[in-house]
Amino acid sequence: MAKDTHLKHRYLEEAIMNLDTSNPMTREHLPGVVRELQKQIVAFLGNNSGHALSRQFRMLLMATEALVKSTA
């Protein structure tokens, strides 16, 4: 995520916000995929704590946590 970070953040934010959680296939794969994304976001934040997009990535992380809880 260190390169083209702004573009990747925009893409991920758009993808997370527009997931169709009513789709059975999405619901089946969502927990595993989102957990992996969360690991990558946490690693990025750990290695780039002063990055300009740190706050936005923390918010994206919170959105993914809420998404996983809502599908459980």
Image (cartoon, helix red, strand yellow):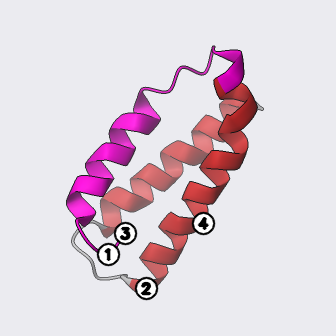
Q: Amino acid at mark 4?
A: Lys
Q: Amino acid at mark 3?
A: Met
| Picture residue at 49% right of the left edge, 65% below the top | 41
Give the quarter of the image for residue 8: bottom left
Residue tagged 3:
1
Quadrant of the image for the C terminus? top right
Q: Amino acid at mark 2?
A: Asn
Q: Nearer the viewer, mark 1 or mark 4?
A: 1
Viewer-nearest residue: 28 or 48: 28
Q: CA distance from mark 2 to mark 4?
A: 12 Å
Q: Amino acid at mark 1?
A: Ala
Residue tagged 1:
2
Give whichever of discs 4 and 3 has the lower sequence position: 3
Give whichever of discs 1 and 2 has the lower sequence position: 1
Local crowd size for mark 3, using a 10 Å CA cut-off: few (<14), some (14–19), many (≥20): few
> At numbered mark 1, what does the secondary structure look like: helix, strand or loop?
loop
Bounds of the magenta segment: 1-25
Residue 39: image tag: 4
Q: Residue furthest top?
A: 22
Question: Decide: marks 1, 2 in contact (CB < 8 A)?
Answer: yes
Question: Decide: marks 2, 4 in contact (CB < 8 A)?
Answer: no
Residue tagged 2:
47
